[in-house]
Amino acid sequence: MKVTVFGIGYVGLVQAAVLAEVGHDVICVDIDQNKVDNLKRGIIPIYEPGLEPIVRENSQTGRLQFTTDAAEGIAHGTLQFIAVGTPPDEDGSADLQYVLAVAETIATHMNDRKIIVNKSTVPVGTADKVSSKIAEVLKTRGVELEFSVASNPEFLKEGAAVNDCMRPDRIVVGTDSLDHENNYVVETMKELYAPFNRNHDRMIFMDVRSAELTKYAANCMLATKISFMNEMAGLAERLGADIEMVRQGIGSDPRIGFHFIYPGCGYGGSCFPKDVQALKRTAEEIDFEPLMLKAVEERNAQQKHVLFSKISAHFNGQLEGKTVALWGLAFKPNTNDMRDAPSRVLMEALWQAGAKVQAFDPEAMEEAQRIYGLRDDLTLSGTPQVALKGADALVICTEWRQFRAPDFEQIAELLKEQVIFDGRNMYEPERMKKKGFAYYAIGR
Ligand code: UDX
């Protein structure tokens, strides 16, 4: 099938590459000439396991193309995916200007029947806005063309995006023309996703608004699980309990489950913070008080300060002139993404208090450089060991695999003081004590 994808960000690029990989004929459109030029040469803008080879191979076969020419893209696809960003507005609501601009472009150039598919995470009601925009432009053009707008939210996780896209748990499609016999949208979407829908049916069709809300509900539910566990961790610490025991104790109840109940130094990334905030705004706009969402957000904001509070307490508030070794800058392992990362809140608080940071991350060093530039109080170290050298303490913000079993003797030698603040509960407190470390974890 012929598919056009607008927006070569994270979601757009992964979706396009995976569709091309199973044999569809895909053109990606982006306004960023530099990005398009790089992709044509096989240089991809993000770090995502498994993505580069499928982008490269499918570009070579011509099944995956990149262009800045919107008209060319629109002429190509029966399906027009919109996967551009929806950054938060000043008030936290999702900014739809890019989505609506693409809708307008599609309407300006389309000359046959199209299905416009919203892939971006957009507030409930956006598909209606996209529809109105297209209808309005077609009317001014004086042409009558059939079109449909569907919502098809993505559920991919960074670091596992290609796999999530190749083997989805579910494929949610919202369309408002469900009751028609031999529905065109339903049939087209089924054909598009047939390669990913084998063995058992993963496709869930529903109305557009429910599909739009499904995306937010999923992310907000997951964020809620984390904030809940972080609250329990705070309680456990103060009550002399061990949250890791509590986690195992509750996770074994299948109604609760083991997934996504890891306490830590707060959730980050491009989705949870933004989506919780955006759904909260949506609720407020219709005068429905989002009690849970507010609590989830507040708990997370506080959680991102927990490590700093522990560090500050350990050093009796005297952080001026101290040097902190920081392992892990990315908001989670297997990505170079530092959007809303807990490490940032920590570093900024440390700098504010007059401390210096020597940081190491396996993938996010360039990103840190890009965000913070050159500054005296940030050293980006080439290895975890270099980061430790002469530091007063080690802090862990991201649970990269290579931090799981470090050489503790070496750590003790390189640090000035044997103290570790672990934001991801990577080590056993008893063992750390025996090794002579002052060890601070979350909730234990
Ligand atoms: C998330 C959703 O998982 C995905 O389905 C959606 O499409 C986009 O948002 P992502 O942002 O890539 O994906 O990251 P995820 O792996 O979900 O982790 C989010 C944050 O939660 C990370 O900062 C992680 O460290 C934190 N987290 C996760 C915890 O603190 N505890 C947990 O138990 C799980």
Image (cartoon, helix red, strand yellow):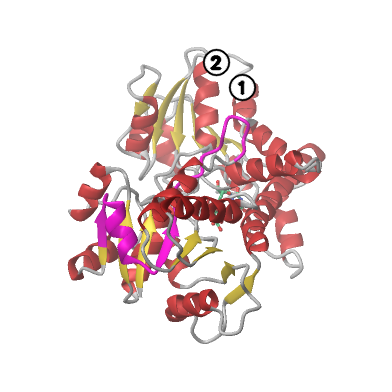
Question: Closest to the observer: 409 or 406?
Answer: 406
Tell me if residue 443 can be seen.
no
Q: From the image, tell me which residue sits under label 2.
A: 353
In the picture, measured across the screen, residue 398 lies left or right of residue 383, that is: right
Amino acid at circle 1:
Ser
Q: Quadrant of residue 106?
A: bottom left
- Counting from the top left corner in percent of width and height, residue 76 is at 31, 65
Q: Is residue 34 above or below residue 206?
A: above
Residue assigned mark 1: 312
Which stretch did the figure color magenta?
A: 65-93
The x and y percentages for residue 192 are 43, 76
- Where is residue 358? Give x, y as percent: 40, 28
Q: Which element carries disc 2, helix, strand or loop?
A: loop
Residue displayed at 45% across by 49% down = 140
Q: Is label 1 in contact with label 2 (beta carbons under 8 Å)?
A: yes
311 lies above or below 173: above
Q: Residue at x 55, y 37 (%)?
A: 88
Left or right for 324, reference 250: left
Residue 324 x/y as whole percent: 47, 26
Residue at 21 percent across and 48 percent down: it is: 38
Magenta residue check for 60: no
- Can you tell which of label 1 and label 2 is closer to the viewer? 2
Q: Residue at x 65, y 40 (%)?
A: 277
Tell me the kind of residue under disc 2.
Answer: Ala
